[in-house]
Amino acid sequence: MTVHLVPWDTSCNLLEMAERLYDAAGTFDCVSKGDLVAIKLHVGEMGNPYYVQPFFVHQIVKKVEEAGGKPFLTDSNTYYLAQRNNAVDHCGTARMNGFGFAPFIAADGLRSENERLVKTKGILKEVEVAGAIAEADAMIVVSHDKGHALTGFGGAIKNLGMGCATRKGKLRQHRTVGLEIDESKCVGCGLCKKVCEMGLPDIVEGKARNISPECMRCPVCMEACPKGAIKLIDKENLGKALASTAYAVLSTFKKGKVSYVSFAENISQFCDCVPAPGSRVMNDIGIFASDSPVSVDAAFLQRADYKIFNDAYGVDCWTQVRELKSLGVRGDLNPKIKEIK
């Protein structure tokens, strides 16, 4: 399977090169006349400068319209309490970050009430998929490749898995990761509770105790603990859960109705979900296009120094890619990469 790539070369007109990329890859072959086409993207957390630039997405909108489709921009609301936690704030963030040129529809509704419980395979048996994703006729998945503290990196599979799930679906995925508190080390200082936006864990009889089913297993409390009493375990399960959810999302589309464009530039330490994404940790690579999430993410990992992420976060970036392949989603773990010159 071939993945097409435009190398990131700012001495060229990258919009013109992207046009050639899409034509070569058949990116918009998934669009039929009259299709309601979800352009699944991340509009960026307020203050984060590294999300995919709006002019590239505007070009994709125009290409969908030329193919006869009816495009809308979409993403699901966040589980955590940030600027994209509900549809109103999410839409406002999209406008502020430059995405006012096309309709933006929060995929899971005003407060994440619009969902479809979809059966899947792998580590999850079912998962809540955002309703507007499940109801779309076709989808262009526009991703930014970057680091992620729990899964190593985020690309097309994470965009499908986490980005197309409701709050319930996001929590279901995150809860596959375990959290342990060593009470012999805990001194009950409460720093963990202070840094958690949900006020977790509870401090009971002078000890931190994570008894809440609302905990999404982010690493904030672990990183804040001065005694090293908190530890996340089985972190690789989240990569498997991403694959399981991605499988569910794809099952809501007919064959050949989803295409992928991934931007491997401004490859940052952390994901686009935070206002402070950290430093850029490797050189820009380019724009990948494929009809397979397995292949497009594998192509990025081929070209990236992904061990930077593996070493930083203690997880294997390949877990989510291999898992989705093992679930039966078509793709190549060693795809041929054809550069567009």
Image (cartoon, rainbow, N blue to C red):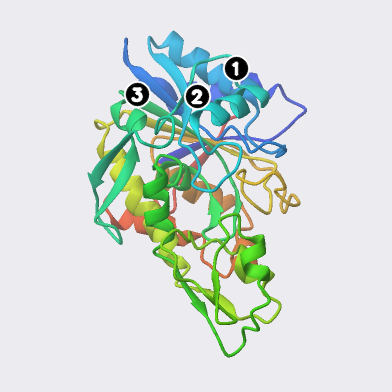
Choose between 44 and 88: the one closer to the eye: 88
Whether residue 311 is visible to the viewer of this picture, yes or no, is: no
Alpha-carbon span between mark 3 and mark 1 = 24 Å
At which x and y percent is residue 216?
48, 59
Q: Residue at x 68, y 49 (%)?
A: 268
Q: Specify which label sits upstream in the sequence, 3 or 2.
A: 2
Alpha-carbon span between mark 3 and mark 2 = 12 Å
Choose between 341 and 278: the one closer to the eye: 278
Instruction: Identify whether 78 is placed above or below 281.
Output: above
The three-letter code of the residue at mark 2 reads Tyr
**Mark 3 Cα shell of 10 Å, populated few (<14), some (14-19), many (≥20):** many
Residue identifier under label 3: 30
Q: The C terminus lies in which quarter of the figure?
A: top right
Residue identifier under label 1: 100
Q: Residue at x 51, y 12 (%)?
A: 62
Residue identifier under label 2: 22
